[in-house]
Amino acid sequence: MATYGYHDNKQKHLNRLRRIEGQVRGLQRMVEDDSYCIDILTQTSAVNKALRSFALSLLDEHLKHCVAHAVANGGDEAEEKVREASEAIARLVRS
């Protein structure tokens, strides 16, 4: 089984994702309860920020572990990992 860059912080990441899940459930309750539009939008912004922060943390770990390891080994794997990371960054920038 492969060990990925987030392995050492796996529980921290799971806890963070559970908090985000709770925020999304809160959004559902707000809609069910007919909350004010701006309040729902404010909460939506908070969820988006939390997801972006999680993604950036995971990307940082990926670069420090997976990409750095591949670059140290060189060859096709290094090129592939750098390409994957570049595409992931592009997706994050577009979102």
Image (spheres, rainbow, N blue to C red):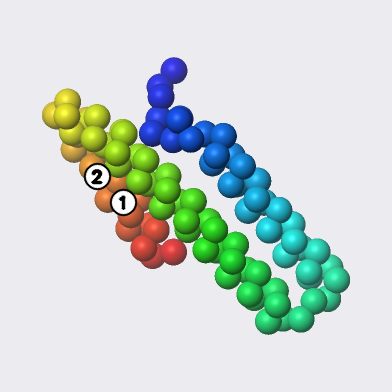
Helix, strand or loop at label 1? It is helix
Identify the image quadrant of residue 27. Answer: bottom right
Helix, strand or loop at label 2? It is helix
The residue indicated by pointer 1 is 87
Quadrant that contains the C terminus: bottom left
Kind of residue indicated by mark 2: Arg
The residue sitting at the left extreme is 75
Task: Give the class, few, some or many, for how many residues have Cα within 10 Å of label 1's Cα (few <14, many ≥20).
Answer: few
Which percent across, then down, holds residue 34? Answer: 83, 76
**Callout 2 touching callout 1 (CB < 8 Å):** yes
Which percent across, then down, holds residue 4? Answer: 40, 30
Kind of residue indicated by mark 1: Glu
> Residue at position x 47%, y 56% from top?
53
Gap in angstroms between the C-alphas marked 2 and 1:
6 Å
Query: Which of the numbered marks, if any, corresponds to residue 83?
Result: 2
> Residue at position x 30%, y 46% from top?
85
Count all numbered tags in the image, as a single digit: 2
Quadrant that contains the N terminus: top left
* Left or right position of 27 against 58: right
Which percent across, then down, holds residue 52? Answer: 47, 58
> Residue at position x 65%, y 46% from top?
18
* Left or right position of 31 against 86: right
